[in-house]
Amino acid sequence: MKKIFALVMTIMLCFALTTCNEKVSIDFPFEVSNVKNVEMFHFIVPADAKKKVITESKDIEGIYQTFESISLKDKATEPTAGGSVTSFRFNLSDGTSYEIIYSAVAVKSGRIITMDMEQDFFTSADIGANWERYNYEIITVSEDELPALYE
C-alpha cells in the first residue's frame, strides 16, 4: 500500500511541476502581410533610447517569424540591474499597432510581454540580438515614444 501511495504522489508531483512550467507562445492577432513597418527600440536607460524603423518586407517577416517560433515559460527570474530593453511596435496597415517588450535578464535570455498577455514570460531566445541584426538608420527618441504596456 505504501508503494502505491508513493507512486501516486510521485505522479501527482510530476504533473504539478509540468503545469507550473507551462509553455506559452506568441500568437499574433494579425498576419505579417498586414504589417506596414516595425519600429524597434533599444535602451539600457530610457532617456538614451534609440529606434530603427524596419521597412523591408523580408526583414519584417524575419522579426514576425522570430516571435512566432519562440517558446515562453512561466518561470521566475530576478531582474537585472543595467539590463537592456528591446521593444517592437508593429505598425499595421489599418492604422493600429501591436507592441512587444523584451527585457534581458542574462546573456541570450530575458522576459517578454505583448499587448494581449496578462503577465510577462521567460524566454531563452536572444531577442535583443535583433537590434544588431538589422542595418537601418538609428534615430534618437524620447521616453514618451517608447512602448509601455504597464500603465
Image (tube, rainbow, N blue to C red):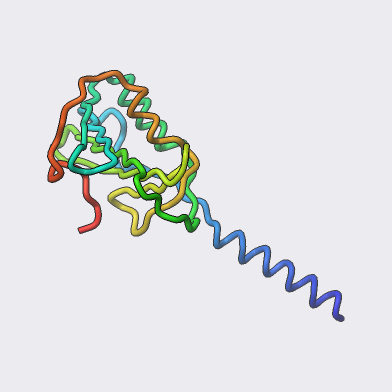
Judge left or right: residue 109 versus residue 150: right
Q: Is residue 24 above or below residue 17?
A: above
Rendering coords of residue 140 (x, y %): 15, 31
| Number of numbered discs visible in the structure rendering | 0
- Please name the residue shown 61% across and 59% down the image: 18
Within the image, what quadrant is residue 21 found in? bottom right
- Please name the residue shown 32% across and 22% down the image: 134
Q: Residue furthest bottom?
A: 1
Rendering coords of residue 131 (x, y %): 33, 29
Q: Quadrant of the C terminus?
A: bottom left
Q: Is residue 6 above or below residue 97?
A: below
Rendering coords of residue 107 (x, y %): 47, 38
Rendering coords of residue 51 (x, y %): 21, 31
- Which of 58 and 144 lies nearest the eye of the viewer? 144
Q: Is residue 14 above or below residue 111?
A: below
Judge left or right: residue 63 versus residue 21: left
- Which of 46 and 122 lies nearest the eye of the viewer? 46
Judge left or right: residue 15 versus residue 28: right
- Please name the residue shown 49% across and 51% down the image: 73
Within the image, what quadrant is residue 52 found in? top left
- Which of 9 and 87 lies nearest the eye of the viewer? 87
Q: Quadrant of the N terminus?
A: bottom right
